[in-house]
Image (tube, rainbow, N blue to C red):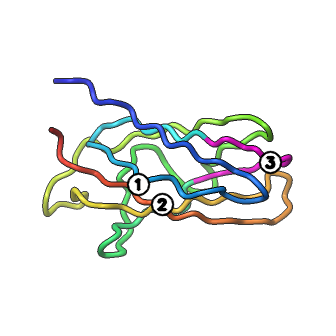
């Protein structure tokens, strides 16, 4: 079986928010996904994946292997880059609980110092059958 190319998603944090939405992530089952948060701000930020839904239906889904939510945040240190490692589930199929489709995931940015600021970003993730 050929090795799947890892997916790297670069996200810039600047001026107390996300600079731009990343391009749609495209992957296959069992792909590694690494989010790289480039914090150009003077504040440390906690970042986590708040939720994931199927884009077309709006139904909640979990195409990632590792847990998500506030308890699984990474702290993006100011003036540095921080990694969040994930992996797509291995079992996707047509007409199953995890279909090949586009998913919308919400990234949440909160002030690591407890300042109460929360900013959300809702990029897309396509999961396609292996080639």
Q: Please report the residue visible at 39 percent of the width from the left and 44 percent of the height from the top.
A: 65
- Label 3: element kind: loop
Looking at the rendering, the stretch of residues picked out in magenta corresponds to 37-48
Residue 130 place in picture, x, y as percent: 18, 40
Residue marked by disc 2: 123
The question of residue 114 being in magenta is answered with: no
Q: Nearer the viewer, residue 66 or 47?
A: 47
Q: Does residue 129 appear to the left or right of 126 in the view shown?
A: left
Whether tag 1 and tag 3 are in contact, CB under 8 A, the answer is no
Where residue 14 sits: x, y (%)?
A: 74, 52
As drawn, 128 above or below 103: above
Find out whether residue 40 is within the magenta segment.
yes
Q: Is residue 11 above or below residue 56?
A: above
Specify the quadrant of the image occupied by residue 58. Answer: bottom left
The quarter holding residue 10 reads top right
Residue at 66%, 57% (x, y): give it: 18
Q: Residue at x 58, y 39 (%)?
A: 36
Q: Quadrant of residue 90?
A: top left
The residue to which callout 1 is attached is: 24
Secondary structure state at the residue bearing disc 1: loop
Q: Residues within 10 Å of mark 1 (few under 14, many from 20)?
A: some
Residues 57 and 36: in front is 36
Checking the image for residue 41, the label placed there is 3
Point out residue 33 in the picture as x, y percentages from the top left corner. Answer: 43, 39
């Amino acid at each position: 079986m050929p090795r799947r190319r890892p997916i790297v998603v670069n996200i810039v944090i600047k001026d107390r928010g996300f600079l731009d939405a990343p391009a749609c992530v495209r992957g296959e089952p069992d792909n590694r996904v690494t989010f790289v948060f480039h914090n150009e701000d003077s504040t440390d930020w906690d970042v986590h994946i708040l939720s994931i839904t199927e884009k077309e239906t709006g139904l909640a889904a979990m195409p990632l292997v590792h847990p998500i939510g506030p308890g699984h945040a990474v702290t993006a240190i100011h003036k540095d880059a921080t990694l969040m490692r994930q992996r797509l589930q291995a079992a996707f199929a047509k007409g199953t609980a995890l279909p090949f489709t586009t998913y919308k995931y919400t990234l949440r940015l909160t002030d690591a110092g407890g300042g109460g600021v929360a900013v959300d970003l809702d990029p897309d993730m396509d999961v396609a059958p292996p080639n």
